[in-house]
Image (spheres, rainbow, N blue to C red):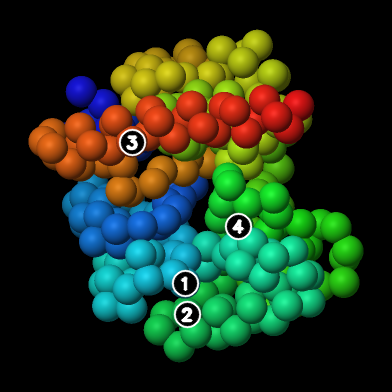
Amino acid sequence: MDFTIEKYKELLEALKNHNHLILRHDVDLKPNFSLRIAQVETAAGLKAIYYFRTVPKSYDEEIIRQIVSLGHRAGYHYESLTTCNGDMEAAYEDFCKNLEKLREVVPITTACAHGSPRSPWNSQEMWETTKQHDIHALGIDYEPMLDTDFSKTLYLTDTGRRWDGYKVSVRDKVPQYQEQWEKAGLVFHSTDDIIRALRNPEHPIHQKELLINTHPQRWMPIGLGWLKETTLQNVKNIAKRIIVLNQN
Protein backbone atom coordinates (compact mmCIF):
# COMPACT_ATOMS: atom_id res chain seq x y z
CA MET A 1 0.00 0.00 0.00
CA ASP A 2 1.25 3.46 -0.90
CA PHE A 3 1.02 6.74 1.06
CA THR A 4 1.19 5.10 4.46
CA ILE A 5 3.43 6.05 7.37
CA GLU A 6 5.40 2.83 6.92
CA LYS A 7 5.92 3.54 3.23
CA TYR A 8 7.13 7.05 4.08
CA LYS A 9 9.68 5.57 6.49
CA GLU A 10 10.93 3.35 3.66
CA LEU A 11 11.21 6.39 1.40
CA LEU A 12 13.24 8.28 4.01
CA GLU A 13 15.70 5.42 4.34
CA ALA A 14 16.10 5.31 0.57
CA LEU A 15 16.57 9.09 0.41
CA LYS A 16 19.64 8.74 2.60
CA ASN A 17 21.31 7.29 -0.50
CA HIS A 18 21.03 10.65 -2.26
CA ASN A 19 23.76 13.23 -1.73
CA HIS A 20 21.92 16.44 -2.69
CA LEU A 21 18.46 16.48 -1.15
CA ILE A 22 15.95 19.12 -0.05
CA LEU A 23 12.81 17.82 1.66
CA ARG A 24 9.81 20.15 1.45
CA HIS A 25 6.27 19.79 2.82
CA ASP A 26 3.19 21.84 1.95
CA VAL A 27 0.92 21.93 4.99
CA ASP A 28 -2.36 22.56 3.19
CA LEU A 29 -4.46 21.18 6.05
CA LYS A 30 -4.35 18.85 9.10
CA PRO A 31 -1.19 20.29 10.72
CA ASN A 32 -1.18 17.47 13.29
CA PHE A 33 -0.32 15.10 10.43
CA SER A 34 2.71 17.30 9.69
CA LEU A 35 3.91 16.98 13.27
CA ARG A 36 3.74 13.20 12.96
CA ILE A 37 5.79 13.28 9.74
CA ALA A 38 8.29 15.67 11.36
CA GLN A 39 8.75 13.22 14.23
CA VAL A 40 9.32 10.37 11.78
CA GLU A 41 11.94 12.42 9.91
CA THR A 42 13.73 13.38 13.10
CA ALA A 43 13.91 9.72 14.11
CA ALA A 44 15.40 8.98 10.68
CA GLY A 45 17.98 11.75 11.06
CA LEU A 46 16.58 13.94 8.28
CA LYS A 47 15.39 17.56 8.30
CA ALA A 48 12.75 19.26 6.15
CA ILE A 49 11.02 22.57 5.46
CA TYR A 50 7.33 22.85 6.39
CA TYR A 51 5.32 25.51 4.55
CA PHE A 52 2.24 26.65 6.51
CA ARG A 53 -0.73 28.51 5.10
CA THR A 54 -2.25 31.15 7.40
CA VAL A 55 -5.78 29.76 7.13
CA PRO A 56 -7.29 27.93 10.14
CA LYS A 57 -7.10 24.45 8.57
CA SER A 58 -3.31 24.77 8.23
CA TYR A 59 -2.18 27.30 10.82
CA ASP A 60 -1.47 26.01 14.33
CA GLU A 61 1.11 27.98 16.28
CA GLU A 62 1.86 25.26 18.81
CA ILE A 63 2.45 22.65 16.11
CA ILE A 64 4.63 25.08 14.16
CA ARG A 65 6.75 25.60 17.30
CA GLN A 66 6.98 21.86 17.94
CA ILE A 67 8.10 21.11 14.39
CA VAL A 68 10.80 23.79 14.55
CA SER A 69 11.90 22.52 17.96
CA LEU A 70 12.62 19.17 16.29
CA GLY A 71 15.19 20.89 14.08
CA HIS A 72 13.07 21.47 10.98
CA ARG A 73 12.43 24.83 9.27
CA ALA A 74 9.06 26.52 8.91
CA GLY A 75 8.06 28.60 5.90
CA TYR A 76 5.12 30.65 4.69
CA HIS A 77 2.83 28.91 2.14
CA TYR A 78 1.37 32.06 0.65
CA GLU A 79 -1.76 32.44 -1.49
CA SER A 80 -2.16 36.22 -1.30
CA LEU A 81 -3.03 36.87 -4.94
CA THR A 82 -5.90 34.39 -4.63
CA THR A 83 -7.25 35.73 -1.34
CA CYS A 84 -7.01 39.30 -2.69
CA ASN A 85 -8.76 38.45 -5.98
CA GLY A 86 -5.83 39.33 -8.20
CA ASP A 87 -5.12 42.76 -6.69
CA MET A 88 -1.29 42.94 -6.73
CA GLU A 89 -0.90 45.72 -4.16
CA ALA A 90 -3.42 44.23 -1.76
CA ALA A 91 -1.75 40.85 -2.20
CA TYR A 92 1.67 42.29 -1.35
CA GLU A 93 0.28 43.89 1.81
CA ASP A 94 -1.43 40.62 2.72
CA PHE A 95 1.83 38.71 2.18
CA CYS A 96 3.76 41.10 4.43
CA LYS A 97 1.10 40.99 7.15
CA ASN A 98 0.98 37.19 7.25
CA LEU A 99 4.76 36.89 7.07
CA GLU A 100 5.09 39.04 10.19
CA LYS A 101 2.36 37.00 11.89
CA LEU A 102 4.37 33.82 11.33
CA ARG A 103 7.60 35.49 12.38
CA GLU A 104 6.07 36.24 15.75
CA VAL A 105 5.93 32.46 16.23
CA VAL A 106 9.19 31.19 14.71
CA PRO A 107 11.94 32.49 12.38
CA ILE A 108 10.76 32.51 8.75
CA THR A 109 13.26 32.94 5.91
CA THR A 110 11.58 30.82 3.23
CA ALA A 111 8.23 31.00 1.44
CA CYS A 112 6.50 29.09 -1.34
CA ALA A 113 3.23 29.73 -3.18
CA HIS A 114 0.18 27.57 -2.57
CA GLY A 115 -1.20 26.19 -5.83
CA SER A 116 -4.90 27.03 -5.34
CA PRO A 117 -5.96 24.97 -8.41
CA ARG A 118 -9.47 26.46 -8.55
CA SER A 119 -8.15 30.02 -8.52
CA PRO A 120 -7.49 31.96 -11.75
CA TRP A 121 -4.50 33.59 -10.04
CA ASN A 122 -1.05 32.20 -9.38
CA SER A 123 0.38 33.94 -6.30
CA GLN A 124 3.92 33.38 -7.56
CA GLU A 125 3.18 36.02 -10.20
CA MET A 126 3.43 38.65 -7.44
CA TRP A 127 7.19 38.52 -7.99
CA GLU A 128 7.39 37.46 -11.63
CA THR A 129 4.90 39.70 -13.42
CA THR A 130 5.21 43.33 -12.37
CA LYS A 131 8.70 43.18 -10.76
CA GLN A 132 7.48 45.94 -8.41
CA HIS A 133 8.18 43.84 -5.35
CA ASP A 134 11.10 41.59 -4.45
CA ILE A 135 10.39 38.65 -2.15
CA HIS A 136 14.08 38.49 -1.18
CA ALA A 137 13.99 42.08 0.08
CA LEU A 138 11.60 40.83 2.77
CA GLY A 139 14.20 38.56 4.34
CA ILE A 140 13.18 35.51 2.31
CA ASP A 141 16.33 33.71 1.22
CA TYR A 142 14.62 30.78 -0.51
CA GLU A 143 11.49 30.46 -2.63
CA PRO A 144 11.75 26.92 -4.05
CA MET A 145 10.03 27.52 -7.35
CA LEU A 146 11.88 30.79 -7.99
CA ASP A 147 15.32 30.03 -6.57
CA THR A 148 15.90 26.44 -7.70
CA ASP A 149 17.96 25.74 -10.82
CA PHE A 150 15.80 23.04 -12.37
CA SER A 151 18.38 22.35 -15.07
CA LYS A 152 20.34 20.70 -12.25
CA THR A 153 17.52 19.77 -9.86
CA LEU A 154 14.78 17.16 -10.24
CA TYR A 155 11.45 18.12 -8.69
CA LEU A 156 9.25 15.31 -7.39
CA THR A 157 5.91 16.00 -5.71
CA ASP A 158 3.07 13.81 -4.46
CA THR A 159 0.45 16.23 -5.82
CA GLY A 160 -2.56 14.19 -6.87
CA ARG A 161 -1.45 11.41 -4.50
CA ARG A 162 0.88 10.13 -7.19
CA TRP A 163 4.41 11.06 -8.19
CA ASP A 164 3.57 11.73 -11.84
CA GLY A 165 0.71 14.02 -10.89
CA TYR A 166 2.05 16.86 -13.05
CA LYS A 167 -0.21 15.41 -15.74
CA VAL A 168 -3.27 16.56 -13.78
CA SER A 169 -1.68 19.35 -11.74
CA VAL A 170 -2.65 22.95 -12.40
CA ARG A 171 0.44 24.60 -10.90
CA ASP A 172 2.60 22.21 -8.87
CA LYS A 173 4.95 21.29 -11.72
CA VAL A 174 7.90 22.55 -13.76
CA PRO A 175 6.50 22.49 -17.33
CA GLN A 176 9.72 23.44 -19.11
CA TYR A 177 11.57 20.40 -17.74
CA GLN A 178 8.93 17.66 -17.42
CA GLU A 179 9.52 16.35 -20.95
CA GLN A 180 13.30 16.23 -20.41
CA TRP A 181 12.86 14.33 -17.15
CA GLU A 182 10.49 11.88 -18.78
CA LYS A 183 12.99 11.14 -21.59
CA ALA A 184 15.73 10.64 -18.99
CA GLY A 185 13.68 8.10 -17.04
CA LEU A 186 13.12 10.50 -14.16
CA VAL A 187 9.34 10.19 -13.94
CA PHE A 188 7.87 7.90 -11.28
CA HIS A 189 4.32 6.83 -10.47
CA SER A 190 4.53 5.14 -7.07
CA THR A 191 6.69 5.62 -4.00
CA ASP A 192 8.16 2.18 -4.62
CA ASP A 193 9.33 3.37 -8.04
CA ILE A 194 11.32 6.16 -6.37
CA ILE A 195 12.68 3.84 -3.68
CA ARG A 196 13.96 1.39 -6.30
CA ALA A 197 15.65 4.21 -8.20
CA LEU A 198 17.32 5.55 -5.06
CA ARG A 199 18.59 2.11 -4.12
CA ASN A 200 20.21 1.72 -7.54
CA PRO A 201 23.48 3.70 -7.58
CA GLU A 202 23.49 3.63 -11.40
CA HIS A 203 20.06 5.24 -11.77
CA PRO A 204 20.05 8.76 -13.31
CA ILE A 205 18.22 10.09 -10.23
CA HIS A 206 21.67 10.30 -8.61
CA GLN A 207 22.92 12.64 -11.34
CA LYS A 208 20.52 15.39 -10.27
CA GLU A 209 20.01 17.38 -7.12
CA LEU A 210 16.65 16.40 -5.66
CA LEU A 211 13.84 18.62 -4.40
CA ILE A 212 11.07 16.41 -3.08
CA ASN A 213 7.73 17.78 -1.93
CA THR A 214 5.01 15.97 -0.01
CA HIS A 215 1.68 16.92 1.52
CA PRO A 216 1.72 15.31 4.99
CA GLN A 217 -2.07 14.90 5.19
CA ARG A 218 -1.77 12.21 2.49
CA TRP A 219 0.46 9.93 4.59
CA MET A 220 -1.35 7.97 7.28
CA PRO A 221 -1.92 4.45 8.67
CA ILE A 222 -4.17 2.12 6.67
CA GLY A 223 -7.80 2.60 7.72
CA LEU A 224 -10.92 4.57 6.95
CA GLY A 225 -9.00 7.86 6.81
CA TRP A 226 -6.56 6.41 4.28
CA LEU A 227 -9.44 5.08 2.15
CA LYS A 228 -11.28 8.41 2.32
CA GLU A 229 -8.17 10.32 1.26
CA THR A 230 -7.61 7.94 -1.66
CA THR A 231 -11.18 8.24 -2.90
CA LEU A 232 -11.35 12.03 -2.48
CA GLN A 233 -8.05 12.56 -4.29
CA ASN A 234 -9.19 10.46 -7.25
CA VAL A 235 -12.22 12.73 -7.59
CA LYS A 236 -10.03 15.85 -7.29
CA ASN A 237 -7.71 14.55 -10.00
CA ILE A 238 -10.62 14.28 -12.42
CA ALA A 239 -11.61 17.88 -11.68
CA LYS A 240 -8.01 19.11 -12.04
CA ARG A 241 -7.60 17.27 -15.33
CA ILE A 242 -10.63 19.15 -16.66
CA ILE A 243 -9.08 22.46 -15.53
CA VAL A 244 -5.77 21.59 -17.21
CA LEU A 245 -7.52 20.61 -20.46
CA ASN A 246 -9.45 23.89 -20.46
CA GLN A 247 -6.20 25.83 -20.05
CA ASN A 248 -4.67 24.23 -23.14
Marked residue nearer the N-terminal end (1 or 4)? 1
Q: CA distance from mark 1 to mark 3?
A: 23 Å
Residue 32 is situated, as x and y percent measured from the top left of the image, at 24, 61
Marked residue nearer the N-terminal end (3 or 2)? 2
The answer to the question of whether label 2 and label 1 lie on touching residues, with beta carbons closer than 8 A, is yes
Q: CA distance from mark 3 to mark 2?
A: 30 Å
Label 2 residue SS? helix
Task: Name the residue beneath numbered marker 3.
Answer: 232
Which residue is at 59% across, 28% downward?
242
Three-letter amino acid code at the position of disc 3: Leu
Disc 1 or disc 3, which is closer to the eye? 3
Q: Is residue 91 left or right of residue 226?
A: right
Q: CA distance from mark 2 to mark 1?
A: 8 Å
Query: Quadrant location of the C terminus?
Result: top right
Which residue is at 69% across, 50% downward?
120
Which residue is at 49% across, 15% downward?
203
Q: CA distance from mark 4 to mark 2?
A: 15 Å
Label 3 residue SS? helix
Q: How many marks?
A: 4
Instruction: Examine the rendered structure and indicate whether residue 203 appears above or below residue 21.
Output: above
Three-letter amino acid code at the position of disc 4: Ala
Displayed quadrant of residue 136: bottom right
Question: What's the mark number on residue 54?
Answer: 1
Task: Name the residue beneath numbered marker 4.
Answer: 113
Task: Name the residue beneath numbered marker 2.
Answer: 102
Q: Is residue 2 left or right of residue 116?
A: left
Marked residue nearer the N-terminal end (4 or 3)? 4
